Amino acid sequence: MKISARNNIPGKVTNIKLGPVSAEVTINVAPGIDIVSVISTTSAEVLKLKVGAPAIAVIKASSVMVGVEH
């Protein structure tokens, strides 16, 4: 797979919540670290996502916010 996004984080699908329009997909990328993405249910079906299967979280953003606790 070749794409322009540089932030590609491999992991394993740990949860999928399918809705009529959207699906919430959780990918574990390191012990205790999950990335959750909301994609269309159609995309989840086309990708044939399954819990336990490998997946890549591809992050493409024009800005990233950073916060700290006081």
Image: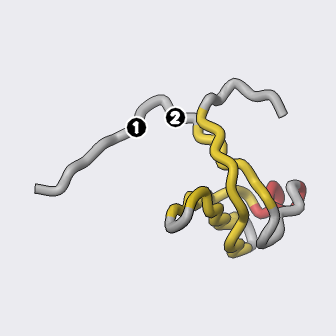
Tell me, for residue 38, which label it has, or none. none
Q: Residue at x 89, y 56 (%)?
A: 46
- In which quarter of the view is residue 64 placed? top left
The secondary structure type at the circle numbered 2 is loop
Residue that carries the numbered disc 1 in the rendered image: 64
> Where is residue 56 shown, x and y percent of the image?
72, 48
Q: Residue at x 71, y 62 (%)?
A: 12
Q: Residue at x 75, y 28 (%)?
A: 3
In this orientation, which residue lies closer to the viewer: 2 or 29?
A: 29
> Where is residue 32 shown, x and y percent of the image?
50, 67
In the rendered image, the vertical position of residue 67 relative to residue 5, given as above or below: below
| Left or right placement of residue 16 versus residue 68 in this view | right
Q: Tell me if label 2 and label 1 are in contact, CB under 8 Å.
A: yes
Cα distance between the residues tagged 2 and 1: 7 Å
In the rendered image, the vertical position of residue 20 relative to residue 27, given as above or below: below
Toward the left, the furthest residue is 70
Q: How many marks?
A: 2
- In which quarter of the view is residue 9 placed? top right
Q: Residues within 10 Å of mark 2 (few under 14, many from 20)?
A: few
The secondary structure type at the circle numbered 1 is loop
Residue that carries the numbered disc 2 in the rendered image: 61
Amino acid at circle 1: Val
> Where is residue 48 shown, x and y percent of the image?
89, 61
Amino acid at circle 2: Ala
Colour scheme: secondary structure
Q: Quadrant of the N terminus?
A: top right
Q: Residues within 10 Å of mark 1 (few under 14, many from 20)?
A: few
